[in-house]
Amino acid sequence: MQKVFVNHTNHPSARWNAEQISAAKFYGEIQDFPFPAINPRADRADIIELAKENLEKILELKPGAVLCQGEFNYTFALVERLKALGITALAATSERVVSVEILPDGSSRQISTFRFVRFREY
């Protein structure tokens, strides 16, 4: 059975560059599973319940690996469960390139560009 690389982030794989797509396909065919909106008022029990609910849905996709990045508490709860099941949990690493432009009025505009480098296991 074909394994799946589950992209569980707020960054759809359709916007990835060729290098990131190639790195993901090492683990299987890419399947986006959008990261949930996390209520900032949610308590730990709420976060754990949401992680459990989404874990069940992710498992249905037969993941070879899961890229999980977003709100920290939820990410931790989900990654902890994925690892307990022996499923590879990943984070994307990137290089941040910053350019600063000084505007005519003396103010500045900063643009940050993030370039994919690799996936790293949790």
Image (cartoon, helix red, strand yellow):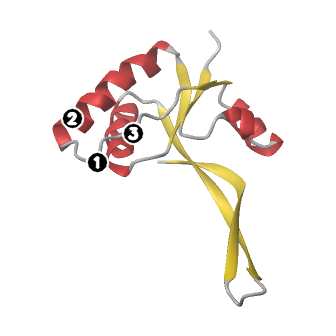
| Quadrant in which residue 50 is drawn | top left
Which residue position is annotated with label 2? 46
Residue 48: percent from the left, percent from the top? 24, 35
Mark-to-mark CA distance, 1 and 3: 19 Å
Label 3 near label 1: C-beta < 8 Å? no
| Amino acid carrying mark 3 in the image | Val
Q: Residues within 10 Å of mark 1 (few under 14, many from 20)?
A: few
Question: Mark 2 or mark 3: which is in front?
Answer: 2
Residue projecting furthest to the bottom: 106
Badge 2 marks a residue whose secondary structure is helix
| Quadrant in which residue 29 is drawn | top right
Residue for point 22% across, 42% down:
42
* Relative horizontal placement of residue 66, taking residue 16 as reference (left or right): left
**N-terminal label among 2 and 1:** 1
Which residue position is annotated with label 1? 40
* Relative horizontal placement of residue 117, taking residue 11 as reference (left or right): right
Residue projecting furthest to the right: 18
Badge 3 marks a residue whose secondary structure is helix
Residue 99: percent from the left, percent from the top? 75, 75
Residue for point 42% across, 34% down:
36
Which residue position is annotated with label 3? 79
Residue 113: percent from the left, percent from the top? 72, 62
The residue closer to the viewer here, 86 or 31, is 31
